[in-house]
Image (tube, helix red, strand yellow):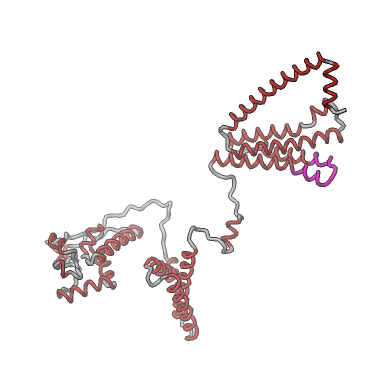
Amino acid sequence: MPPIDQITAFASAHTVETIIISVIALVLLVLAFFALRALIRLFRRWAAGRPTEDILTIVAASIATGVSAQGMWRFSGDVLGFDGPLRLLLFAFIEVAVITSAVRARRNMRENYSAGIDGLAVWVLTSLSAVLSSMDARSVAEAVFRLAAPLVAAWLWERGMAIERVRITGRGRINWRLTPERVLVRIGLAEASDRTASEVDAHRRLTRVALAAKRFRALREAGASDRKLRAAMARLDKAMDQAVEYTGLAVDEKRQEALLSQIGALYNTSALIDLAPPVPWAPEPEQPAPPALPAATIAELIDDEDEDVPAESAPPVVDTAQRAAQFRAARQYWDQQIARKYVPRAADIAQEVGIPLLAAKEWRALWKLEPQAYALIEAAYREHGIVDTGTFPAIEVPERERVLVVNGSASGAAAHDS
């Protein structure tokens, strides 16, 4: 007889009992509804401030723990012979111990930033549960499944702990020395910086030119044979041709400066041997005040046409870093004025940058030989017959006739100065 017919027959024969059972079932359904709604509210309140990955981790770990507990249920009945209430009370003691150790490990991590011995206990107890569950398996596939389920739960717990550790401390536990990124960089298949492919290629081609130039110079200084010199020059020419073709070396000033910097570093490698860097933990020595130069020496250092510049005492002693900073500032001012078709005087450089007049004269004597500055000085000589001394005043040129102005600015500025 079908179940529905059995229920109908029972209700016809036992009307009172059927009514009582129906009322009790209805009450139980109402209670189950309210209990389920309360559980849903509690779950929403618990999950409100948690990331989605934490919730999914807990759900997946709970499922894996349930699978492990089912395996222990069978193990306690088939192997240990537990039955009835004893089996119900004792089958999941390892899973309860795993959950307890996991809670303690999370609390230790929040307080001491380390899971401690409880974190190790989670893995040991999980492995024990996996082994015991798989021992009662009926096939190899079932054994593998029961071994995997508890380990999956432990792995999800470990990853959740790692994410929370990073969130609390702001750093990971360790930095691996052997990672895919480092391997790819080591074998040359990846770039460690954020340079583009064209930048990397240009840098390598410029480096080939610099190394080829160094090789040729070393062979020439060593007195190598003509055959070796010709071969080295051929390699240098080939590297230079490729650099000009693929990097725009002929028109790109930044790459020209990069090439010169590499050549300068390679040519002066031996200078590193004689460097005397300061000791970082040594006290700074007190530098005595430099003695003043005699008046006759000061008079010789000042030009007749520079009488408006006050005489200076001996230049102060500065370290290498400070002198380099002054040199860069003076060079920047010089380039700005040359771009305006104006060759500044030594006094202008000294006053603008705040350096001794002697240093300004020394640097100006070097810079005025460069092509652009030399062209300005030559034009001034051809147009006005003025010989550059580094000290003569600005030349006032009408606006419509201005081609090059040496030791002066625009005509309006020169008129203002006069």
Please provide the residue range marked out in magenta: 131-148
Specify whether residue 137 is painted magenta: yes
Task: Look at the picture and state if 115 lies above or below 373.
Answer: above
Q: Residue furthest top?
A: 16
Identify which residue, 145 or 208, lies in the foreground: 145
Name the main secondary structure of what is drawn in magenta. Answer: helix
Given residues 20 and 48, the one toward you in this image is 20
Q: Nearer the viewer, residue 84 or 166?
A: 84
Quadrant in which residue 76 is drawn: top right
- The picture quadrant where one finds residue 297 is bottom left
Residue furthest toward the left?
418
Q: Nearer the viewer, residue 380 or 115?
A: 380
Q: Position of residue 317 (x, y in %)?
A: 30, 58
Q: Position of residue 110 (x, y in %)?
A: 58, 35
The quadrant of the image that shows the N terminus is top right
Q: Residue at x 52, y 58 (%)?
A: 192
Q: Quadrant of residue 318?
A: bottom left
Q: Residue furthest bottom?
A: 226
Q: Height in image: 171 above or below 100?
A: below
The answer to whether one can see residue 270 in this image is no
